[in-house]
Amino acid sequence: MPDWSGYLTLILHGALVTAQLTVMGCALALVAAFVAGLARLAPVAPVRWLATVYIEFFRGTSIFVQLFWVYFVLPFAGITLSPLLAGVLALGLNVGAYGAEVVRGAILSVPKDQYEATIALNLTRFARMRHVILPQALPLMLPTFGNNAIELLKATAVVSLISLSDMTFQAQVVRAQTGSTLFPFLTILILYFAMAMLITYGIRLLERRMTRGLDGVR
Amino acid sequence: MTDPIIRIQKLDKSFGTLQVLDGLSFEVKPGEKLALIGPSGSGKTTILRMLMTLETISGGRIEVCGEPLYHMTKGGREVPADEAHLHHMRRHIGMVFQHFNLFPHKSVLDNITLAPILTKGEPKAKAEAHAMELLDMVGLAEKAKAMPSQLSGGQKQRVAIARALALKPRIMLFDEVTSALDPELVEEVLLVMKRLAAETDMTMLLVTHEMGFAHEFADRVLFFDKGRIVEEGPPDRIFTNPTHERTQTFLRKIIAAGHRV
């Protein structure tokens, strides 16, 4: 009879790595999404091109390949990253590329007359974005951001490729050692689901807060 | 004679192949109340939007308060205006829109104080005190804490007028401000504008289909058709004794549609 509690601890350690990757990856993705999404709308053409190249590259190649490059190829250019950092970088930049299009789309879907009102009130470009456009665009972004965050959570499983012991990696270790598939994979199924529910719930809370007072407008 | 506050010279505007304005020239004196009337698509709204820098010009020149709006001098030469110049010029001008364009995520008070605080750097307390005076003037002081979605169309438009006034522009543009309102809400907005016209020396340009109001409100009426001024003059003459055939036809149609003149 295997020591299930010991194996469970092992998987929970993996869950911690998964959670860490998800939180840090989402933070980077959020920053990348806003930087690239706003850059796509910049008045300066080269800035727009740069953002487009980033977005198309990271959407057009697989996360698996990107991770491999970040961890195994970048050292040849003199950049050596820890596995965790490499994982966060690849996941964050990958999901950030999808997020950038969400940011851009949401900003563009704020009605044009709102934008015109900010010009008539002589707000600066920054003030327009910060006080009028983004507050109305954010609630539109949130549902898709929730999707992206859950996608990122599930994509963390690829990091075992670069020797990070995340939840899926640990589950495979347990399976190899005990011969049981049901125990480790049922456990991580429940854990992934619980984490995804946590994200869903968090986004829903945020959505409710941000749309307060906005009902019946659009 | 005083210098004009707005001088428009040989102004052209086209959207693609559609020519909206064709060599348009006119001037507006400080404090003048001007009504722009004419059939839809005659270019009246486009003029207001160009004065508010919401459209670019295709040719010609606009001067506001003695300075070119879309041109600036750089190294002794006149070049197209940049954003900084437009920002500098926009402080003279305010605009009220057909669809109010209030910020739905901000309270009535915040809608009004946003620009004075951000653009003019006014302290919050001062901006709010001024906003309350303006709300009082448009008869909505008790709605300061309300959200725009809780207001009627007429109330929204009165807030929008207060918001535009908060920056104390010298020129106010009213773009069909009652067209989106239910008929019974039109009067409350017109009343506010009448008071404004009587109590301030602001220059006002009004695009409207309310001929009765234009008659009462304006010092001078410009009748537009196909991007040109067909006829202009004091409202008494334009509305009772138009000389141009196109003006007569237009006014007859408007009256037939049930509008007062």
Image (tube, grey):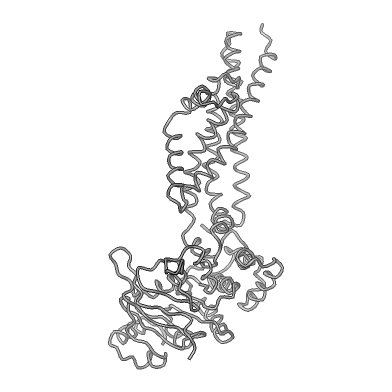
For residue B38, side relative to residue B124 (left or right):
left
Q: Position of residue A29 (x, y in %)?
A: 55, 38
Residue at the right extreme of this rendering: B125
**Furthest residue to the front?**
B76
Vertical relation: A92 (above or below) A112: above
Quarter-of-image position of residue A172: top right
Q: Nearer the viewer, residue A143 or A32?
A: A32
Q: Quadrant of the N terminus of chain A?
A: top right
Q: Image check: B134 left or right of B217?
A: right
Please name the residue shown 42% across and 90% down the image: B235
**Residue located 45% across and 39% down the image:** A55
Q: How many marks can you see?
A: 0
Residue drawn at point x = 66 percent, y = 65 percent: B145
Q: Does residue A178 sit above or below A28 in this rendering?
A: above
Q: Position of residue B252 (x, y in %)?
A: 32, 85
In percent of width and height, residue B25 lies at 36, 80
Q: Nearer the viewer, residue B146 or A135?
A: A135
Pick the front one: A39 or A33: A39
Q: Position of residue A86 (x, y in %)?
A: 56, 27
Rendered view: B107 above or below B2 = above
| Near-viewer residue (B11 or A23) | B11
Furthest residue in direction top, as rendered: A1
